[in-house]
Every structure is written in structure tokens, then in C-alpha cells.
Amino acid sequence: MSSTSTLARPATARPTRTRPRKRGLHSPHVLWLAVPSLVWFAVFAVGPLAAMFVIATLRWKGLLYEPTYAGTENISKVFADPTFYAAIRNSTVQVAVVIPLMIPLSFMLGYHLNSRPRGYRILSILYFSPGLISISVTGMVFYGVLSPDGGVNGVLRAVGLDTWATAWLADPGTALPTLIAIDLWRGIGWTAVLFAARLASLPADVLEAARIDGAGRLRTMWQIAFPMVKDYVRTLTMLQYLWTLFTSAALILLLTKGGPGTSSTTLSYLVYAKAFAQRDLGYSQVVGVVLLLLGIAGMALIHVLLRSPRENPR
Amino acid sequence: MTTIRRPRRTGGPAATVLSWLYALLLAAPLYYLAVSALKTNIEIFTRPFALPTHWLWDNFSTAWRTADLGGALLNSVLISAVAIVLTLALALPAAYALARQDNRLARAITGAFSAGFLIPPFAALIPTVILAIKLDLFYTREFQMLFLPASALPLSVLLLTQFMRTVPPALVESAALDGAGHWRLLISVFIPIAMPGLVSVTILQLLTFWNEYLFSLTITGTAPDVRTVQVALPTLISDATNFGVLTAGTVLTLLPVYVTYAISSRRMQEALTAGAVKG
């Protein structure tokens, strides 16, 4: 981990200190060099994001048709649709289970990893590997593992729990929990590696001093190390929240197609399905706007809940 | 790894047990994937975790042919390569500018990229598809080559800026006294010093481009001549999926990434954690 901290160092250095000396050397014209990337970003990222709000007001039956203005028709259609409420419910369950489990578990595992336990190399390679695997490969791996005659049911039968074996992805009771389990499978180890890298950049003597002072293991972890990286915890929580909320569509598309029924339809998948399978772009983008608003609201909430240590005495 | 600066603070037995239990959970599906790739359906179903009795290497060639993985790999390489060149060509000058200038405007630009880094690209998937249609680049590889750099720009610019800020002002001054302009400064002073950051950004974004799925599926599409390997792989699923062939195809898709990881595991780990340590 020592080399990781070298990399993390520029991130924590204070760039402001050198600023006054540089300023005399050049004019603000140097910022023109940032223009091409800003234009690129505006055309391919900001533009589409803004267009979402316009498309939400159009009656648009599929990509190859001409849209017409529909005002708030799409909004009333979405808010009268039971599928939309099912998706709200599923997304809420997904986020409410994934985030509170993932963040503390990853922090503890990252803390453990940073203490370089026996077998540390193997652990860190394994924890890291979900970060290398694409969503499409993840989908294929679990398509095999979770199929009725796949690995999970094989294990259950081998240990005599035949009655537990089920078609995990085709059973309305298990489809969403299974997808949530895959989120956790992928996310915990990867986030733990990130926490370990961040913890490695802390001055070693602080944790050492706490230990010598007789602070217990749990106390050192939660009352000394945790407040020191709280800003980072907040950042990772926000990122994981946004990724969990927004990007579930791909895995759902590969594994359950939102079903059975609407049992695993999340808001993210609804955006995708309405646009490409059910050819209602206006509806899809109303949901997209809802998703964006939920993303921003959730971020604000996390920001308040995980205040930095300076604002929060302890 | 030569000296361990702090003594081992071994976690309690609970931490050890839990960390290995989770490691086992991570390893099991990957092991299952590897052994299934060499089996028939019947063997996969009846002896899921056993080693294959007869090593069925044919699965690999079947997967290669059925999903046309050769062409798909080539498309992935092509898209990733063009996209990374474009990303660096756009991000390096921008990072240079932001590292050299720290007025209100520069901070506003940094703020815009920071916000852009947070919003997942998926948010704007459908409008992006429409943009591809309007640009007459729907179902082509070219749109992904242009679009992927845009999604990679925020993080690339922010990371590179941080590395470029470590350039000592004295070095800039002496180079400027020699009459070096912005481009000379960028190429002969800033890029060499920011090289570790440049390598990290390149690895990180190449992996992201290589693994991209949903935009490739909806914009580049599933036609065999343009589709990427991530899109080609799921086509091995059918009403009568041959799981041996499917897992063999999955192994083939993963192989380039794992080979790279085996060669440069530390570099890669640095690159990927840097991406998120930035935040």
C-alpha cells in the first residue's frame, strides 16, 4: 500500500501555496487551453442532460418517429402508473439495503486490510477483482451461478438444503434481493480497497499513538481513524449512492429484465425499458428527471448526515 | 514492500474470519466460472464445483466462433484506443491551464468538472442516443470514440491537474526565461513531471472504455461488424444456453484485463484507487 499513498499524496497537497508566485508569469489567456475539453463536455454530457427536461414534455413514440409537444401529459401518465410506484419502491429498497451495509463493512474491511494482516496480498487481489470485471461479464457469471441448475443451488443441494434451492432470478420473491446481493458482492471489496488506500495515506503515528495509549481495536477504528477520513467516507457514500441508484439498469437488463412482473424493476431500469422496449420516450425521460432529482436530494442528505469532523465535535 | 514501517496491528479473530469469508464469496463465482468453461452442460449441472473429468477445450473455440469474439475484440481495441488518445489530447491542455491559473474562472471550470464527475453517464443515456441519431452516427463505432472521452474528461482533467500542480514554480520560471511557450512548457516540463498521473489516467480510462456496456449496446448496437466484446458476450445466451460455451466466452472476455493486471498489478491498483481517492 505504500506506493498507493505516493499517488494519493498530490490529491491532499495544498496547491494554493504556490499560486501567488506563478501568477506573475502568465496571463489568464492560458485558460483558452481548457476550451476544447469544455466544449466536448458540453456537447456530449451537459447537452444530453439538459435535453432530458425537454424530452420529458414530448409525446414521442420511439426513436424513429417525430415528437410532438405534450406539456405535462407525460408527468400525469407517470404518476398514475403503478409500475412507476413499484420502481420507486424497488429503488428505495435497493439503496436502503446496499448503502448502510456496504459503507460500514467496506470501512472495516479496508481498515483491516490496511493493518496488513496475514495473506494481505491474496485478500487485496480478490477484493480488487470486481473492479476489473465489466457489468456484462458480471451478468454472465451470475447468470451461470444463479441458474436453476447453477452453482448456488448446487451448493445448497450438496449441504442438504434442497428446499432452499430456487430459480433465484425468476422468483418474484428473490429477484430483487439477488440483484442487491450482487451489488454488495461487487461493491464491498472494491470500496474496501479504496478505504485501505486512503487510510494508508494517514500519518501512521496517530493510530500507533492511540494504540499505545491503550485504545482498544474498535475504539481506534471508529473514534480515531474514522473521523480522520470522514470526508472521504462521505465522498464514497455519495458515489456509491449515485452508482447504485443510476446504474442498476445494465445488470437488470442482463439478468431479470425487470421481472418477474415488476418485482425487480428499478427506476434506472424503467428509464431504459420505457425508451427501448416500450417506445415511450416522454415517459422514460420523466422518470429520468425524477431519478436525477432523487440523486441530488440523496446527495444533499448524505452531505448533511456525514458532516466533516470540524463541524461535529468528537 | 522492503520495509514495513509500522508493526502488524492484527485485527481480532472476528476481522480475520470475516475478511476471509468474504474473500471466499468473491472467489467462488470466479472459480465456478473457470471450471465450468471446460465442462458440458450436464457436468456443470451435476457436479458444479468439481474439476472437469474431461477438459473440454472446444468450448473456447465454439464461443469464439459463435459470438464472433475475434471481430468484437478488434472493435473494442479500436474504440478504446481512439477514445484514449482523444481523451488525453483534450484533457492534458485543460489540466495544464487549470494548474497554471487559479482565478475565479479556473475554479468555476474545476467545479463544473467536479459536478460532472459525480453524475453517472447513465443519467443521460436516452438523449445521448438521440444525439447519435441526429449526428448520423447511430449504430457506428465512431460515436463511441467521440462520446467516451466526454464521459472520461471530468476525472481525467481533475487528476491530471493535481499532478501538474506539483511542478516546481522555479522550473516553470527558468523554462519561461528560455522563451518556452505554453506548448513547449506542457510537453517538456509538465507532462514529464505529471507522468505517473498520466499513466494512471490512461490505465483507469482504458479499463472504463473496455468495460463499457450499456452505451455500446444501445448506440453501437449488436451488429457483428461493429459490436464490442462486452456486447458480443451476452449473445451467447439463448433459450438453450450452453453454459460451458457461455463461461468460456466470459473467460475469453476477461482474459485481456486479467493479463494486464497480472503484468502490472501494482500500477493498475494505483490507477484505480487514484481515480476514487480523488473524489
Image: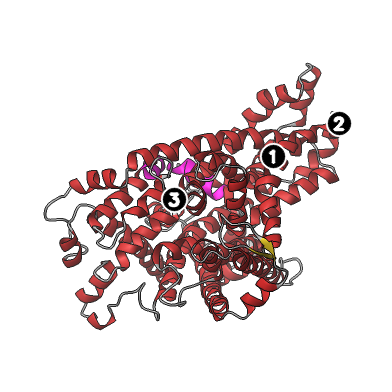
By secondary structure, the bulk of the magenta-drawn segment is best described as helix
- Mark 2 belongs to chain: A
Q: Earlier in the sequence, mark 3 or mark 1?
A: 1
Q: Are marks 2 and 3 on the same chain?
A: yes
Task: Say if A306 sits above or below B184 in the image.
Answer: below
Query: Tag 2's secondary structure?
Result: loop
In the image, A255 versus A306, the foreground residue is A255
Assess disc 3: are there few (<14), some (14-19) or many (≥20) residues with their C-alpha within 10 Å of its C-alpha. many
A182 sits left or right of A103 in the view: left
Where residue B148 appears, as percent x and y from the top left, is 57, 44
Q: Are marks 3 and 1 on the same chain?
A: yes
- Mark 3 belongs to chain: A
Assess disc 2: are there few (<14), some (14-19) or many (≥20) residues with their C-alpha within 10 Å of its C-alpha. few
In the image, B207 versus B245, the foreground residue is B245
Badge 3 is on which residue? A132
Q: Earlier in the sequence, mark 2 or mark 1?
A: 2
Badge 1 is on which residue? A37
**Amino acid at circle 2:** Ser
Task: Quote the CA–CA distance across marks 2 and 3.
Answer: 43 Å
Magenta-drawn segment:
B256-274
Q: Residue furthest left?
A: B53
Task: Quote the CA–CA distance across marks 2 and 1.
Answer: 20 Å
**Amino acid at circle 1:** Ser
- Kindly identify the residue that appears in the image at 63 percent across and 50 percent down: B278
Badge 2 is on which residue? A27
